[in-house]
Amino acid sequence: MSNYHIKHLEEYYQVYRKSVRNPEAFWEEIAEEHFVWRKRWDNVLSWDFTKPEIKWFEGAQLNITENCIDRHLPTRGNKTAILFEPNDPKEEAEHITYRQLHERVCKMANVLLEKGVKKGDRVCIYLPMIPELAISVLACARIGAIHSVVFAGFSSNALSTRINDSDCKLVITSDGSYRGSKTIDLKGIVDKALEACPGVENVLVAKRIHSEIEMVPNRDYWLQPLLDEAYSDNVAEIMNAEDPLFILYTSGSTGRPKGMVHTTAGYMVYSAYTFKNIFQYKENDVYWCTADIGWITGHSYIVYGPLANGATTVMFEGVPSYPDFGRFWEVVQKHKVTQFYTAPTAIRALAKENLDFVEKYDLSSLKVLGSVGEPINEEAWHWYNNNVGKKNSPIVDTWWQTETGGIMISPIPYVTPTTPTYATLPFIGIQPALMDENGQEIKGNQVDGRLCIKFPWPSIARTIWGNHDRYRDTYFSAYENMYFTGDGALRDAVGYYRITGRVDDVIIVSGHNLGTAPIEDSINEHPAVAESAIVGFPHDVKGNALYGYIILKETGESRDKNNLRKEINQQITEQIGPIAKLDKIQFVSGLPKTRSGKIMRRILRKIASNDTSNLGDTSTLLNPEIVQEIMDNAL
Ligand code: PRX
């Protein structure tokens, strides 16, 4: 038997060494023993980080949905695959068994085929957290269409950019969505987006909120009648190991969002293997990840990883504050959740509320707690550990990225002793390196540097859709023969890693990755704005919040500043989405710039964080006098 399930620390070290000494042999064994293949690979791995080109399990053929669904039918047909918990606690939860999931995915796959979607076509999925979202994802994978899920909190503008970037020919959406006490007109957002998307031929609409919506003839179709008529079986398309499985957009520090491309076999193997170990998943567990499937966390650890292990995965439509701040814990009690995986921002928001919201519920089913998306601060870690885990459930602080496809640095619960704020040890097969500014690796312990990975792992993204040069430039050009993560990290005396945050212009707000450039572009489109720069500053719930420094045109000078602030945030909401709104806006007469015209964000960051004791040497700036003015008027 291969080392599919690691149970103690010695075993971790032993398996880790094995995975690093001979990665091909290691991953081959895992792939062989735990997945179903239509054809075996010819070659486990070929790679060249200079091109970059990475191929895992080349020559193999498979369909990921046969691994996630069909193969479980003989033994787990009546087991719940997806446990859907609706926004409104009064609405009954839905248990979708593996057999039912099979039927629903097959029907959806047949609807897509009937609408002319073929292997390799791109399908955009813009849905709330309802079962149709997971089913659509799997249906695309079933027929070999490449899904591009866009988080349903993005605006029409952000949606159309993503649809056009990857030429999606079909969009799956719903009439609307529930979010706590609010409803959102998703179909209206899609209609607006599609004004700019001539390539979209059809829109399939799931009914969720039963609102009156416009249906464009010959373009828009209600999903349910099509599903009712569709055959309930579907022969899965046979995919090559390196065929794209999905595209998922993430922000970069400059330019447009990057459509990260993940391929089939390696992604499947790594998401499944990490899921099994990092959540110590056992057969009758009820696993709940509170992320949205619109993010990578949802792709890998709500859909693919859990289902590949035959797990029961909870899909939650609602928000942690509705109908009150006890909702998460009510759901844990109700479904006897065993693994609970959430984001530090949610923990911080809940920690501000009365403890009664937690203490009212029986949380004794919990065995493992997880955290993802941003560094978890010590206070939040202890609150989570004391009040949710009752000091009995290890916290796995999991570090990874959209680009990595799966968890990279994390404790294994009941195996790795945890330390607050530390993601601890590299997962099996992962070879991290800390680099200095001169491109040299920093060896030894008690050091810090820029976090890179030296060797490919199966679920690394293979390219950026339509822009391989950007993929190389962003991830493989900073350091020779290394994947550069964009994060800083330290390694302590025992070799544990602690992620210290982004070292580029990406800002993580409430666990969402936001690039400064698209937000600044959207601000600059406001008629009164001449130029802008945004930076992050510490925020007690969101982790970071956005601070904008804005230079107005002459026409803007006489305007009411509070109205302008509202208009600017409105503009950002329309172009990107409410998650990118600025918390603070300071109007300035200039921005500190180097002699080559580059904005000195380091100084702006310090002012925004109210940390002006050590601004460094500002005398070499093009306009040193501006620094004092900005400091005097800081918010
Ligand atoms: O800065 C790191 C932070 O989130 C970034 C990746 O964001 P995204 O691609 O949206 O994926 C988020 C979910 C996997 C990373 O570069 N990050 C993620 N997890 C952690 C983290 N920072 C510190 N600790 C973590 N556990």
Image (cartoon, rainbow, N blue to C red):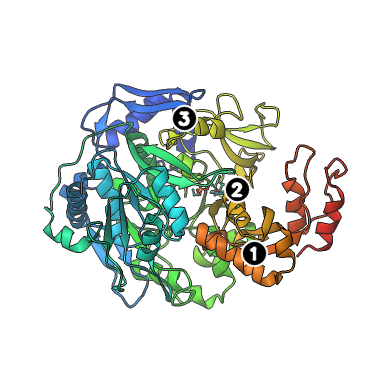
Residues 529 and 484: in front is: 529
The answer to whether the residue labelled 3 contacts the one labelled 1, judged by CB atoms less than 8 Å apart, is no
Count residues near mark 2 (Cα–Cα under 10 Å), then give few for <14, some for 14-19, many for 20+. many
Q: Which mark is residue 385?
A: none
**In front: mark 3 or mark 1?**
1
Residue 132's image quarter? bottom left
Above or below, 283 relative to 129: above
Q: Earlier in the sequence, mark 3 or mark 1?
A: 3
Amino acid identity at mark 2: Ala
Amino acid identity at mark 1: Asp
Amino acid identity at mark 3: Pro
Q: Which residue is mark 3?
A: 456
Q: Is residue 541 visible?
A: no
Count residues near mark 1 (Cα–Cα under 10 Å), then give few for <14, some for 14-19, many for 20+. some
The quarter of the rendered structure image containing the N terminus is top left
Q: Which residue is mark 1?
A: 583
SS for callout 2: helix
Residue 515 placement (x, y as % from top left): 58, 49
Q: Does 426 sit left or right of 557 as displayed?
A: left
List the single residue furthest toward the front. Answer: 555
Q: Which residue is mark 2?
A: 517
Residue 572 placement (x, y as % from top left): 56, 60
Residue 193's image quarter? bottom left
The quarter of the rendered structure image containing the C terminus is bottom right
Alpha-carbon distance for marks 3 and 1? Answer: 39 Å
Residue 351 placement (x, y as % from top left): 57, 69
Residue at (72% x, 47% y) in the render: 601
